[in-house]
Image: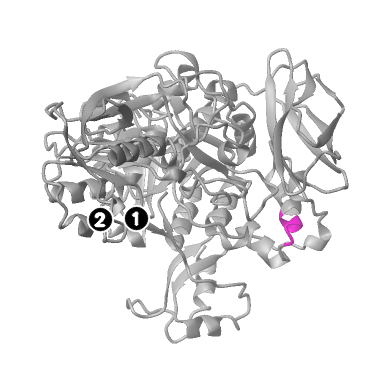
Amino acid sequence: MDDLQGWYQTFLPSTLSTSSADNEPRIIYSYHNVFKGFAARLSPEQVKAMENKPGFVSARPQKILPLHTTHSPNFLGLNQNRGFWRDSNYGRGVIIGVLDSGVTPDHPSFGDEGMPPPPAKWKGICQLNSTTACNNKLIGARYYTIGNGTALDENGHGTHTASTAAGNFVRGANVYGNANGTAAGIAPLAHVASYKVCNIDCSESDILAAMDHAIDDGVDVISLSLGGPYRNFHSDNIAVGAFSAVERGIFVSAAAGNRGPSLGTIENGAPWMLTVGASTIDRKIRATAVLGNNEELDGESTFQPADFPTTLLPLVYPGINSSIPNAQFCSPASLRNADVQGKIVLCEIGGGIGRIAKGEAVRDVGGAAMILINQLPQGYSTDSDSHVLPATHLSYADGLRIKAYLNLTSSPTATISFKGTIIGDDRAPVVASFSARGPNLPSPGILKPDVIGPGQNILAAWHISVENNTNTNSNFNIISGTSMSCPHLGGIAALLKNEHPDWSPAAIKSAIMTTADQVNLAGNPIEDQTQRPANFFGMGSGHVNILKATDPGLVYDIHPQDYLPYLCGLNYTDQQVGIIVNRPVTCSEISSISEAELNYPSFTVVLGNDSRTYNRTVTNVGETNSVYAGGIARLPGVDMRVEPSTLRFSGLNQKLTYQVTFSRLATATSNTVVQGFLTWNSSRHSVRSPIVVLFE
């Protein structure tokens, strides 16, 4: 380690290599797990000089990346004191490393009642003001250069994600009295290690340093609710760091990103990570807009004042005939001279102004309430926010109804009826509009996201009181994003790791993917924000079903070395592959494979006039003696043949290989995409792999 540090120092200008002044070149972080290298503050000229040093591989400027509950455990089928939650010991003994904006240590979600001490392998530290701030629940807290000298959470995001993954049981959790119940993380007896790498944004050098420490510290799961626009994996430091973690048996759950519903927006798409999209749960915090024509339009808001009048108030829309650009978005400038005193103001999503900020602008000029409406891309996805005034958030379709009412009425009126928490939306889960979509541009042959999980309107711990309540530290907030779905799956991975300690990260991922649901609570196909069936670029394998994932029957396992032929097949150079796997690689000595040949639990196939044949190997983790029959959902324009058609197992952990041949039929239309499933069925298990075929 010291030798490595000394070698890194030789790359700096010799006269300055020991300088510690803030404005001088110096090493910020030395890495030894994620890859051999360092982060340093250098001028372009100094980087150029460094390129001539023996042993130099590459240098690049760091990028700044964005950050991407009471009911979700129950929605996922987890019930206290019975079933899988009890059988998996609530994740007891598993360590989840959360790379985020820090933590609020005195929040009751991080109390250690009922918690065992951390396992002996734990080597982390607690960089909070006093060592007593850490305990048997929050076993570690580190901060990095972006952390302002503290591991404390200054914006709530890290507290929210950490408590979602592994918060302890907290009774009476609610926001403004809504969504009331006992809050718990998905793995409530797992240990939490917090790594503060973000405030509002996150720096790559900090993220890599945190991953480096997390590997040494002994975490079992890493949760990454952050990321940036896609890049080739050798240029994506999150992908590089995650590979080293997975190589050491650490499961990595990563947010898919919030740039949906546009296609090709997926982030964190490396196949060694679980890439998680966001879905709704079956809880609504109902706020209904009541129009003067007696039409009622159901929306959502967490802030639900008890004293809002039921009498109709004048309804105004700044976007009508306004000479101010983008007035429909309710910017402060557009409302400054508007006549909104005591009125309900109609505002549209967008314009670079946050949903709550729009309400603040309306309140500041005397508006009585706000009706927030979606634009077309958001469709039916609505958020339950902690607004600063009476408000409701409506769908795009309901927004059109309000606009039609405004056009037909000279004196439009409205009010908002607040109806509180309603459980039982049988359309759930729905793919959230913001959830990023495939295809996975750095590797189109790997379907992403892998899976979707609860990410819209999730209640979890918060660093302050959104209600300005000063007499408690039991603060919660409801927010949305793939940042929220990622720790749900991190917690699920912790439960599965406790139940199956011998499973590799790839086996855990396979179990989650091949048992996922494709139908909602009503038994109909899972929908997206348009209320039409979601495609695989939106939902991946489907919505996580944790009760099935613990007993998947078969898994598609991948050992870290299996990624080498895949990476060489992406036509990366030896040096680029070496950056990812952290050792020298010669691709000419490796039998490269195409993306679709990786032993992944899904198929993405580009099909021209020639047939394509791919091998897959499955491992029996179910019954010792079992027989699986292959079944194929019909893909329009594709002839699929599976050999053998039956898999017969006579032992646990036995591996069998099958082949799938895809052939194009004359009915196929070029530049179209079709989807279906390949399913292996036994008397007890159904192992399903999604298939996407693109016709050239």
**Who's the residue at 52% across and 62% down the image?**
1
Q: Dot 2, how many residues are within 10 Å of its Cα: few (below 14), some (14-19), or many (20+)?
A: many
Q: In this view, does 255 lie to the left or right of 461?
A: right
Residue 195: image x %, image y %? 39, 50
According to the picture, the residue beneath numbered tag 2 turns out to be 331
Q: Which of 443 and 189 is in front in this view?
A: 443
Q: Which of 613 and 556 is in front in this view?
A: 613
Q: Do the residues labelled 1 and 2 touch (CB within 8 Å)?
A: yes
Q: Which of 335 and 321 is in front in this view?
A: 321
Q: State which tag comes first along the sequence, 1 or 2.
A: 2
Rendering quarter of residue 280: top left
**Residue 351: mark:** 1
- The amino acid marked with disc number 1 is Gly
* Range shown magenta: 567-571
Q: Is residue 63 left or right of residue 155?
A: right
Residue 479: image x %, image y %? 34, 39
Residue 175: image x %, image y %? 24, 31
Element at badge 2? Answer: loop
Label 1 to label 2, Cα distance in Å? 8 Å
**Residue 68: mark:** none
Q: Which of 461 and 96 is in front in this view?
A: 461
Element at badge 1? Answer: loop
Q: How many marks?
A: 2
